[in-house]
Every structure is written in C-alpha cells, then in structure tokens.
Amino acid sequence: MIARFGIDTTLTLHGRTHMTLPALEGCGFLPGDDPLDRFPAGSPYEALDELGRDLPSLLMDDRFRERIAAIELPTLGDEPVSIRELRLYYVRVGFLASAFINQVGHPPARVLPRRLAIPLCAVCSRLDRPPILSYDGYAIYNWKRFRRNEPVTLGNIDTIQNFVHLYDEHWFILVHVEIEAIAGEAIIHISKLASGLDHNDQEIINQEIIEITAIIARMTGVLKRIPEKMDPAVYYRTFRPYIRFFEGVVYEGVAEEPLDYRGETGAQSAVIPTLVSLLKIPHRPSALTDHLAEMRRFMPAAHRLYIEGVEAVEDPRGRADKGAYNELLEALAAFREIHLGFAREYVARWVVDPRGTGGTPYLEWLGRLIDETRAHKIA
C-alpha cells in the first residue's frame, strides 16, 4: 500500500527527537491528492481540457502550428487558483507548447507564439520552475486512478494527457508513475535511518538499509516491465520527439532573445538524486554532475528542498553492516543498468543525434554513474 507522508516526519528514538526533514505533501514525490483530470464545471480553463483531449488528433494535421497559434488560450488571472488547478493548467499548456515546437514530421519551431508563450511562462512562474514541459508535468501530475481506494499501480492508473493515441505512450508514463509511488515508501525509512544515525542505533541503521534496498528492488521490477506494452520503434518515432529540449526558441511576448531549456528526462525525478544524496556516492565532478545539478531546477520546489535536507543527513557508510550497505548500492546500480539497457534499445539503436531528450550524451554518462555507484561499496 502507498503510505501518506504529508505528516510530521519528526521521529523519536530512545526518548530523543530527530530533526525533521523538509516536508513532502503526499505519497513521497507524488501529489498528496490525486491530480485533477479535468477543470471544474464552469471553470474559465475548461477549454484547455478539450484541447488536451484532441491534441493527438490535432497533431496529425500539417496546419497544427498555424491553427494552435490562432487560438486564444484562457490565461491565468489575478484570482486565486488551487495548486491542483495550476498543475493541470501547466500539464495542458506544457503539452501544447512542446507539441508546437517539436511537431513530428516538421523541423523544430524557433518561435513559441505569444498565445502559448505567455500562458506557459505565467503558470511556470507560479510553480517556480522553467517554462517547458518537464518530468513533473509529463508524469508526476499526469495520472489518474480508476479505483480511488486502490493503490497507484499499473492496471489502476491512466494518463490525463498524451501526445499520441497509441497506448505505448500511456505505458511509458505510467511505469514511471508506479516507480514514483513505490519510491515514496522510502521516505519514512530515510527518516528512520537518519534518526538511527543520529543516535548510533546499529539495529535501526541496518534495518532501514534493508528496507530501502527492498524498495529499490521493487522499483527495478516495475522498470523491467517497459517492453510489455512499449515498442522501441513506436517510442522513438512517434512520441519521444515531443519531449525533446528547446534550443534557440524565442518566447514571443516574453523574451526577445532565443532561450534553451532541457527537455523532459528521468533525471528530473527526485528519486535517484535522493538516494545518491543519502548514500553520499562521490560522482566525479564533470559536465555530468553539472548537468545533474541543473536538473534540479526542473523539479518541484519541495523536491529540491527535500534532496538538500537528505544531503545534510549523516553518511551511513561505515556505520551500517557491510553486507547490507553493499547490497543497497548494488540494488541502485542494478536499477541504473536496466535503465541503461533500455536507453540502448529504445534510443541508441535508432538515433542520429547522440543527445538524449535533455540534450546530453546519455550513454557515456549512464555508464559512468553505474561504475561510480559500485566503486563506493565497502571493500
């Protein structure tokens, strides 16, 4: 079951209180309340739901850009808007903007028209994030449950917004959503581990290391399911182009100079950075680590703060049982190996441009992360 973590995570051990890690609102890095899948009846933003529903069909038209640039999108006014409505607005407008810039079958657009640029920049400013569709809008806020009283798992969830009609894209997103749900269970165990380290409780330290290892193994099991319903050729040719970076794009009505932003990528998830911060894995300073640090800009603000809080937790290396600690590192390396294998199968075998959707030389970098994770084991 998915635990709710929008509660006080202060823990007491041996009568002493452990400092509280920064709060997360709900199921780990997923929202505390399920995302809205449509705006309330009578909302001034209802038209975005219709556009979102029709987007996969609209993109089949060569005149899509001309038509979408002529639509007056509902803009955010001064009235209060709930966080759930802001996130749905971001999902709808973020998808439209990425669809416009990266429409399949056409060269990337270099100007985002004002009727898209202004609403996108407005909502992203309110959400304290760069103005492009990122992992949060593509996955974290882009799911709904069929049965609200059952867990966030494959078979009980679907997407709210897509670029294409094919279920392959639904599956790609939903696998990530379940991984986020499973990873959310680690939050309490990270707090307990931090408390155990504070109070030098060997039993707590080892138990929580084992619990976190088991959670990563479950995440890996879900990641391995990607090929069940996602064809490599379909992924690469039909919907991957839409989540690519923006390069030299003028946001009309917002900025005169061309801007660059990283595209949607799993590196914008807080899950693995949290584990790396917890374990203090020493990744060699390089363009890779600069890139990973930059990816935090594209995370929700609360996720960035949480990672910073975990960075302040004591290093468990040398405090935990050697075998348990090394198994945790191996579990993390194994998760990354599965990811690397899919990067080869779903991207590298098809690609001409060696950069990933975030604009990076991903194969070289992913391999280095695996090596450095294993190198951190206790000899």
Image: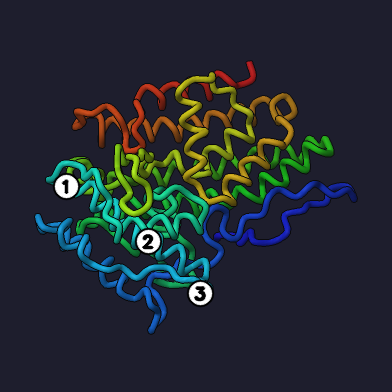
Q: How is the image coloured?
A: rainbow
Quadrant location, the N terminus = bottom right
Residue occupying the point 72% across, 41% down:
193
Quadrant location, the C terminus = top right
Decide: few, some or many residues near mark 1? Use Cα within 10 Å; few <14, some 14-19, many ≥20.
some
- In this view, which residue lies farthest toward the bottom? 42
Q: Going by the image, does 211 lie left or right of 12?
A: left
Please name the residue that numbered disc 2 is placed on.
119
The amino acid type of the residue labelled 1 equals Val
Please name the residue that numbered disc 1 is placed on.
104
Q: Marks 3 and 2, how far apart in space? A: 15 Å
Please name the residue that numbered disc 3 is placed on.
79
Name the residue nearer the viewer: 40 or 213. 40
Of callouts 2 and 1, the N-terminal one: 1
Residue occupying the point 66% across, 51% down:
188
Q: Marks 2 and 1, how far apart in space? A: 23 Å
Of callouts 3 and 2, the N-terminal one: 3
Q: Going by the image, does 5 lie left or right of 365?
A: right
Decide: few, some or many residues near mark 2? Use Cα within 10 Å; few <14, some 14-19, many ≥20.
many
Q: Secondary structure at mark 2?
A: helix
Q: Are marks 3 and 2 in contact (CB under 8 Å)?
A: no
Q: Position of residue 178 (x, y in %)?
A: 44, 54
Q: Is residue 325 above or below residue 160?
A: above
Q: Are marks 2 and 1 in contact (CB under 8 Å)?
A: no
